[in-house]
Amino acid sequence: MHINTTGHATSTAGNAPARGPSAPSTESARIRNDVDSARNTALSALNNDRFRVMLEQISDPRASGALMTMGGSQNGSGTDLNTALSRYAENSD
């Protein structure tokens, strides 16, 4: 899988036409700002080499088989969930 980002993102805050006779409401401005923030975060993630490599690895069909076979140690010395939760609770105090 290869991710290409062409062009550039434009802000939605300045592009949305005002509806009705009054200026956009505070709520619609907040929503546009949230959308802009999400778009900037997504573009930042896509341009991050470490994220790109991780995304390529987990989207590889061969990786699903490897992930399915991952588990506790084969010799039975793995930690069960209740033990892990108990140890976490002890260390959190």
Image (cartoon, rainbow, N blue to C red):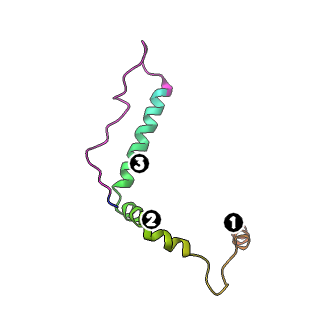
Q: Nearer the viewer, mark 3 or mark 1?
A: 3
The CA distance from mark 2 to mark 1 is: 32 Å
- Mark 2 lies on residue: 58
Amino acid at pointer 2: Ile
Residue at coordinates 40% horizontally, 61% vertically from top-left? 51
Q: Earlier in the sequence, mark 3 or mark 2?
A: 3
- Mark 1 lies on residue: 92
Bounds of the magenta segment: 3-27
Q: Is disc 2 surrounded by few (<14), some (14 to 19) or many (20+) residues within 10 Å?
A: few
- Mark 3 lies on residue: 41
- Residue 86 position by quadrant: bottom right
Is residue 15 highlighted in magenta?
yes
Does residue 86 appear left or right of residue 6 in this picture?
Answer: right
The CA distance from mark 3 to mark 1 is: 32 Å
Q: Nearer the viewer, mark 3 or mark 2?
A: 2
Secondary structure mainly formed by the magenta segment: loop
**If the image is split into quadrants, where does the C terminus sit?**
bottom right
